[in-house]
Amino acid sequence: MKKRSGLLILLGLLLLLSACSPGADKPADKPEETIKPAAKDPEGMVMEGPGKFAGKAYDEAKVRAELKKWPKDMTADEVYNRLVWLMAEDYKPIVKEAKEYEPPFSVSKLRDFDPDSQKHSDKQKQEKNKRKNVVILIDSSGSMAGRVNGKTKMAEAKKAVKEFAASLEGDIRIAIRAYGHKGTNQKKDKELSCASTEELYPLSAYQEERFTQVIDSLKPSGWTPLAAAIRGAGEDLASAHPEDENIVYVVSDGIESCGGDPVKEAKALHQSKIKAVVNIIGFDLDQNSRKSLEQVAKAGGGEFTHVRSAQEMRNEFDRGTYLGRWSEVFWWYSRNAGDLFWARTREINKIEKMLGGVWDRGKIASLCDVEYERMTKALEFLIDQQIVPESMGGSDGEVTKKLDHRKKMIVEYQEKLASQKFKQIEREYDRLIDFLEETKKRENEKLEPYLS
C-alpha cells in the first residue's frame, strides 16, 4: 500500500513540475521558413522573387519587426540571402513579356500578290491580258497658251497625246475630255468656262483620223474646272468593268480656279467600283500648284509628275498605261515603307519603355532600384540595431558589395535583353524593306522598254 502511495506522489510531482516549466502554456513555434542561397547568375536573380515583402506587400514596420528576429552571428552571405528572401522583387512578368515579344510588322497585300508567299497568283500572271481604259483630261484654260521651250504648252500637250494614242496596242480604249475650253479666262466668262467640261472623244478604240481632229480642235481658252473634269471622267468610265484597269491622266498647268474640290473628286473616283487611278501630269507649274496637284494625285491613288516638254509627258503616259501596276506598286511601296518606318519607331519606343533606352530607365532596372533602396535601408537598420557589425555596411561593406553586384547584374541583364529585342526589330524591318525593294525593282524592270 505504501509503495503504491509513493508512486502516486511521484507522478503528481512530475505533473506539477511539467506545468510550472517555462513556455508550458505557449503554443508550439512555427517551423522557421527555409532560406535558400540567393542566385549568383543574373537569370537566376530575376527569377527567384518575389520576396515576402516585395512590391505592394512592402511594409517598413513589418520588415523591421522581421529583421529584429534575425540572429546576431550571421555571415555576410547569410545576411544577403535573408535580404533577398525578404525583399527580392518580382521580375518574372516583365521578363516573360520581353522574351515572348515579336515585332508585329506586316505588309499590306498588293493586288493579286501575297506578300507572305512572295509568289504571283495565276490571276496576276494573266493580268496583262485585262482590258485597259484610258481617259485623258486636257486642260484648255487660257494659261495653256504660255510658252515652254519656244512652243505653247497646248501644242506640246497635243503632240504628246497624239503620239501616245498612236502607239497604243492591244485591248486598250481611250477617251479625251477637255475642260475650260469654252469662253475666255476673263471674269465675265467665268460661269460659262467653269461649266465647260466635255467628252470629245468617247471611250473607244483609237481611230487616228477622228482622234487627230479632236485634238487639233483644242485651243487654250478659259478657266480651270478641274474637279468637274475629274467627276466627268467617272461618267466616261461608266461602261468600264470593275476588273478593267482604269487610268485617268490629267494634263494641267495650273490648279482648280472654279471653286471645286479636285481632291474630293479624285478620291471618290479612286474608291468607286471601277477603282480608277488618277495620275497628274503637271506642266510647267509653280511650287504652290505642284503641292496642290500632288494632293489630287495622292487622293486618286496615282502619281504626280512634273514635266516641261512633250517628250517628258509622253514618257509618263507610256509608263502609266503599259504597266498599269506601276502606280499601284509605287503607292503600295510608299505606303508600306512609311508604315513600316513608323511601326519600327513605335516598337523601339515600346522596348525602350520596357527594357530601357536613351530616355527610359526600363521596368526591370526601375524595379531593381526600388529593391536596392529597400535592401540597403534594411541593412542600415540591422547595423543600427547591432544585429550585424558596421563592417557589413557602408560603401566598402561586405553585404553592400553583394547588393551592388546584384543590382549591376540585373541592370546588365536588362541591357542584354533590350539589345536582343532591338536587333530582332531591325532584322524584321530590314527583311520587309528588302521585300518591298525587290518587288518594286521587279515591277520597274517591266517599264524599261517604254522608257528607253
Image: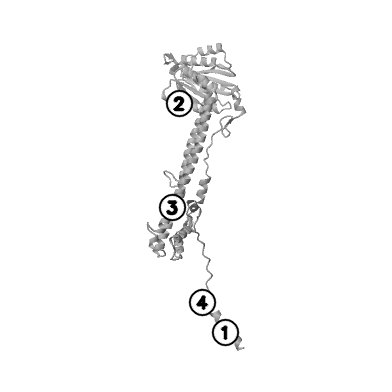
Q: Considering the numbered disc 2 on the image, is that residue within a helix, a strand or a loop?
A: helix
Residue 353 showing in the rendered view: yes
Q: Position of residue 215 (x, y in %)?
A: 51, 14
Please tell me whether mark 4 or mark 2 is closer to you in this view: 4
Q: Is residue 3 left or right of residue 155?
A: right
Q: Position of residue 296 (x, y in %)?
A: 49, 26
* In the rendered image, the vertical position of residue 450 relative to residue 344, given as above or below: above
Q: Residues within 10 Å of mark 2 (few under 14, many from 20)?
A: some
Residue on which the image places disc 2: 292
What whole-number distance in Å separates the C-alpha atoms at marks 1 and 3? Answer: 67 Å
CB within 8 Å, label 4 to label 2: no
Name the residue type under label 1.
Answer: Ile
First along the sequence among labels 4 and 1: 1
Q: CA distance from mark 4 to mark 1?
A: 19 Å
Q: Nearer the viewer, residue 3 or 86?
A: 3
Circle nearer the N terminus (3, 2): 2
Within-10-Å neighbours for mark 4: few <14, some 14–19, many 20+? few
Image quarter of the N terminus: bottom right
Count of labels in the image: 4
Identify the residue position indicated by label 4 in the image. 21
Secondary element at image label 1: helix
Q: Which residue is mark 1?
A: 9
Q: Nearer the viewer, mark 3 or mark 2?
A: 3
Judging depth in this view, the residue of 245 and 237 nearest the camera is: 245
| Label placed on residue 407 | 3
Instruction: Tell me, yes or no, if residue 366 can be seen here.
Output: no
Whether label 3 touches label 2, CB < 8 Å: no
Give the label, 1 or 3, closer to the camera: 3
Mark drawn on residue 308:
none
